[in-house]
Image: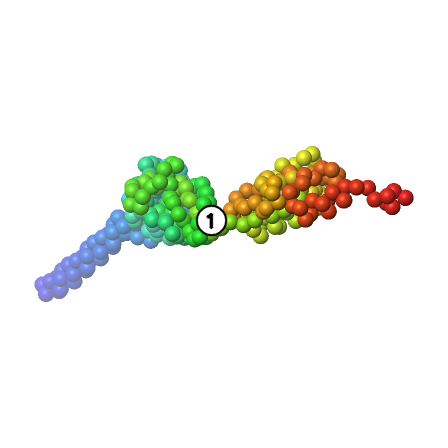
Amino acid sequence: MRENVKQSFWFNALMVALIFSAIYIIFFWALGCLTHHGEQVTLPNLKGKPMQEAIDKLHEMHFEVHVDSTYDPMAKPLAVLKQVPDTGAVVKSGRIVMITVNSIVPMRVPMPNLISLSYRSAEMLLKNNKMFVGDTTYVPDIARGAIKEQKYKGQPIKPGEMIPQGSKIDLVIGNGLGNTDLNVPDLTHMTVDEARAILNANNLVLFPFPEGDIYDTAEAFVIRQNPKAFNDAGQPNKIKMGDMIELTIKQKPDPTDYEPSNNPNTDAVNEKDKKVNPDEDK
């Protein structure tokens, strides 16, 4: 009788141990299936793909997807701009993947204050606000390179006004020349390269009028200029720094092609140059 009880006790204890072991194994096997334990995949590159295509791809890989949005004027609407975790990350299936897509409608942000900034600083500030530099014009001002005015669609825009991201802002910039007056340089009889060097040194703008074909500026000469260096009374004409001088140039001109500059000191010499030296004909 005692032997039967002992056998029954050990048999029951063994069965209980087997049952608990089976439950333990089944529990952790099921837990692994539910949590995809050990199943790791590499995230693909979703950047630039359409939003729906990216979502479908992540769902196929058994990921949950959360979508956020921002605006990038350089990207297509609803294109994926960013993903977290990033491309190439090895993660378990079932995790949440966050994607940021490009908004269809640009956000409106306050217009920054660009006045008195340098061009480079203004460009960086616009870029940080997802805007672009549009046209640039220069005006006489002692503050060389400083922004004097900011415009949107041709009209001045004040700092703080709401404006869409991706907008182009036109800039009016000081050229550092002010209203300084100087004598008009006498450029007749000079080559185009010589005249250009003098104009650049005096912060004047060259506007050439070629007379005939110009194929070598080293042998193309200024035969007329507007304004002239001297008025009819022989007094120097004045011009403001930053203004334009119109030059008529000709390739290998004849002495008779030059227009008098009204300079009493040089025109008489140039008239002598027009006369043929008898010794040169011999």
Q: Residue furthest left?
A: 1
Look at the image and tell me in which quarter the N terminus lies: bottom left
The residue wearing badge 1 is 179
Confirm whether residue 116 shows in the render: yes
Image spot of residue 159 (x, y percent): 31, 46
Disc 1 residue crowd, few under 14, some 14–19, many 20+, Cα 10 Å: few
Q: Residue furthest front?
A: 233
The residue nearer to you, when weighing 154 against 106, is 154
The residue nearer to you, when weighing 243 against 30, is 243
Q: Residue furthest top?
A: 212
Give left or right: position of 195 versus 39.
right
The residue nearer to you, when weighing 155 against 98, is 155
Residue at 25%, 51% in the rendered image? 31
Image spot of residue 210 (x, y percent): 65, 36
The residue nearer to you, when weighing 164 against 60, is 164
Confirm whether residue 41 shows in the render: no
Give left or right: position of 231 versus 68.
right
- Callout 1, which amino acid? Asn
Q: Is residue 124 above or below residue 214?
A: below
Considering the numbered disc 1 on the image, is that residue within a helix, a strand or a loop? loop
Image spot of residue 209 (x, y percent): 63, 36
